[in-house]
Image (cartoon, coloured by chain):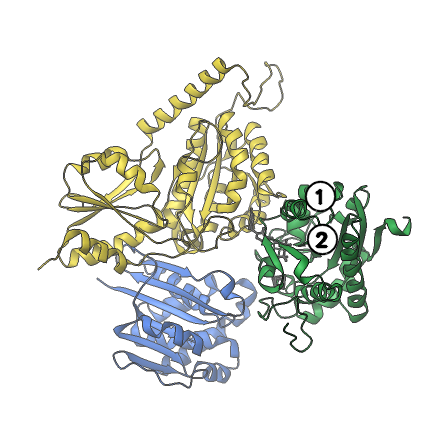
Amino acid sequence: MVKEDIIFAGFGGQGVMLMGRLLAYAGMKEDRHVSWMPSYGPEMRGGTANCTVIVSDKEIPSPLTSKADIVVAMNLPSLLKFLDKVKPGGKLFINTSLIEEDVARDDIEVIEVNANDIALEVGEGRVANMVMLGALINKVGIVKMDTIKSSLSDVLSKRNHDLLEVNKQALDNGAKLV
Amino acid sequence: MKEVAGKPAALTDKPFHYCPGCTHGIIHRLTAEVIDELGIREETIGIAPVGCSVLAYEYFDCDMHEASHGRAPAVATGVKRVHPDKVVFTYQGDGDLASIGTAEIVHAANRGENITTIFVNNAIYGMTGGQMAPTTLIDQKTKTSPAGRSRELTGSPLKISEMLSVLDGVTYLERVSVHDTKHIIKAKKAIKKAFEIQLAGKGFAMVEVLSTCPTNWGMTPIEAMKWLEENMIPIYKPGVLKDIEDGE
Amino acid sequence: MGEKVLMKGNEAIAEAAVKAGCRYFFGYPITPQNEIPAYLSWRLPEVGGVFLQAESEVAASNMVYGAAGAGARVLTSSSSPGISLKAEGISYIAGAELPAVIVNMMRGGPGLGGIQPAQSDYFQATKGMAHGDFHLLVLAPSSVQEAVDLTIDAFALADKYRNPVMLLADGMIGQMMEPVEFTREIDPETLPDKPWATNGAKGREKNIINSLALDPAELEKHNLKLKAKYDQMKEEEVRFASKGLDDAETVIVAYGTAARIAASAIELARQVGYKVGLIRPITLFPFPEEIINQTADKVANFLTIEMSTGQMIEDVRLAVNGKKPVHFYGRTGGMIPSPEEIFEQIKIIGGAKE
Ligand SMILES: Cc1ncc(C[n+]2csc(CCOP(=O)(O)OP(=O)(O)O)c2C)c(N)n1
Ligand code: SF4
């Protein structure tokens, strides 16, 4: 049975909800069971935002997870909040463009991605989320990169469709990092 | 007594949770300054609404009572009838006062309850994420009027202050704004007067304060101030709507 | 149609209402259900329907009362504090025997409470909605797809019984996204006539929509007629899902979100040899008493899991009727129990394994 629980966390505006939705959407396209559960409420106003995505070959019982296989931390507050949530043996992706601290756990694999820097190289600071997602997909699979790319136009709101190509580029450049 | 640099004693040390550029904070401060100047902090009971200012009970350093959505004037009536010698004020948003709580404000005003109401009109529902309010302007886009507010479908911006001003129970009613210093000074004067009327036992007094919601208007704080001035002021004209002391 | 889309629970319910032929919505903003009115504010005009934001929930439920009396398929939605205000209109709708669908995306209470998911309105939904001798038919989805299917069913059930139907979910079902398929679409033009509706007495006797009956004998007759409907619901509408009952020693009873989490706990427990099953009520009224009562003959005990301090457990106990112990575990106020916490309870009840 393949089941992956992933938590994406960052501050509002970093596009962590979008990362999660894109992965869930791609999972759905590959006929997997998926769920996407956002945090909601006042904490999102300027604070941290996070979502839990589950992709599974079986029906998904709880759409929340106590111990995630993968945590993606896009900023320091998210790292502090979710470090303990990574399963022993699980993977932690951290955005080293914004996180300088060392990770105080040695029972997990830490993957460092300087997402904002790479995004700026692509020429669009806002696509740091896609750099990170590219790295994640290349490292752990879950779904095919092609499915992620072909899902973009469905998941991105229409007014952002001029950014489709930049997003794809960011996914590729992120993938190259790992 | 704690006197933090420039902070009114009638405000606690709790940092406001309001979004950057939101004018709720200014209106809190003006109200608190007036309470200080009148020396009534220990005599005052405030009624907090449901809306972004729901946590007003944490900010005002006087006795506070949190009401259910729209019912602050009824709660205030209960408190004031038990303590007629105390100062009772409500602090309410436009959804709270002019939508779900229309009945309560009309009847408290009509009874001439000897209370003070600070009515914060930002033409939108802030707390729930930017839905249309009865005060929303024609063509203004909100979450529940995505194509802009249409008069045919939802009527016109509700001028509740004008409505209330015709009631015999209302002693004083003024509309003010806080989009620049000149207006802020005027706003404070009006709020002070609304409390003084209560202290003199003269009946119901209300100040409508035009306010911004940069977050749900989708603007920067500066744009929001400008939008208020250019769009709200022509519809909601500042000025004294009723003042029976003036023989109006 | 028939294509899978990824949708938030709230939006999926809104679309399902449209697919069910509902063209009228009256509501008032409240978290965590705001996506329902926001969605319908553009979607209903698109299909020639009416979206109206009322000045309060009291008004909204009375607008629903009017529209339902006028013969329309009509929806309103809210969350806990708003449902309390809607109670007035709902009692009149039940008294006047009108079909209407009400969504409650529960949040923690009482009073203003919080905005995180809870199941603390079970009593209100199934027993104490408002004054008078009446029941709602209550449906409790535990996934976005089920929310869609039950929303569409809700309108049909409301029409069948001329009774208000409540979709009882929580902030989690409302906010989460899962793939959904819309396999049914009903054209409101093709729905059967409602000869009792107030649509103008052209060439017929006048119709009256009413809940007043001053003569106690007459009102009692009306109450008994309503009771007959509730009895018929108990005969015909009970729905539940179950899992692992064949070999279960302990059976968890949970609905909605709590049932999803309980299912995860059961996976953990079964891996180490605890034989645990699940009964998930889908209709909360009528309550699946019979399956619980029958199961009580075969298992050692029950564990009720709720996001409250214990409300449905009273119905579980009534159904078990003293045959076996019924335990309880709940988190409340917007806290969500974890599978591990539930697993701990299973261990306490089931004793040590190995
Ligand atoms: C009975 C009830 N219905 C709905 C809500 C949800 N609600 C909370 S605040 C609010 C509107 C607030 O808008 P407004 O009064 O304009 O104040 P603002 O947030 O803009 O300051 C609503 C509808 C509630 N808490 N209770
Ligand atoms: S949402 Fe609007 S009213 Fe509420 S705090 Fe933010 S800016 Fe102010």
In the rendered image, residue A22, in percent from the top left (x then y), is placed at 42, 65
Residue at the spot 48% in from the left edge and 75% down from the top edge = A127
Residue A75 visible here: no
| Pointer 1 or 2: first along the chain | 1
Q: Residue reaching furthest left? A: C354
Q: Are marks 1 and 2 in contact (CB under 8 Å)?
A: yes
Q: Please, what secondary structure does the residue beneath circle 2 have?
A: strand
What residue does disc 1 label? B108
Q: Is residue B11 above or below residue C345?
A: below
From the viewer's side, name the closer residue of C281 and C190. C281
Q: Is mark 1 within 8 Å of ligand 1?
A: no
Q: Is residue C122 above or below residue A91?
A: above
Chain letter behind tag 1: B
Residue at the spot 51% in from the left edge and 46% down from the top edge = C81
Which colour denotes chain C?
Answer: yellow
In the rendered image, residue B105, in percent from the top left (x then y), is placed at 70, 45
Which colour denotes chain A?
Answer: blue
What residue does disc 2 label? B117
Residue A87 visible here: yes
Report the chain shown in green.
B
In the rendered image, residue B221, in percent from the top left (x then y), is placed at 67, 70
Residue at the spot 69% in from the left edge and 76% down from the top edge = B6
Instruction: Using a 10 Å C-alpha cutoff, classify the residue at mark 1 as few (fewer than 14 neighbours), some (14 to 19) or many (20 or more).
Output: many
Where, by quadrant of the figure, is residue B194 drawn? bottom right
In the rendered image, residue B166, in percent from the top left (x then y), is placed at 82, 43
Name the amino acid type tagged 1.
Ala
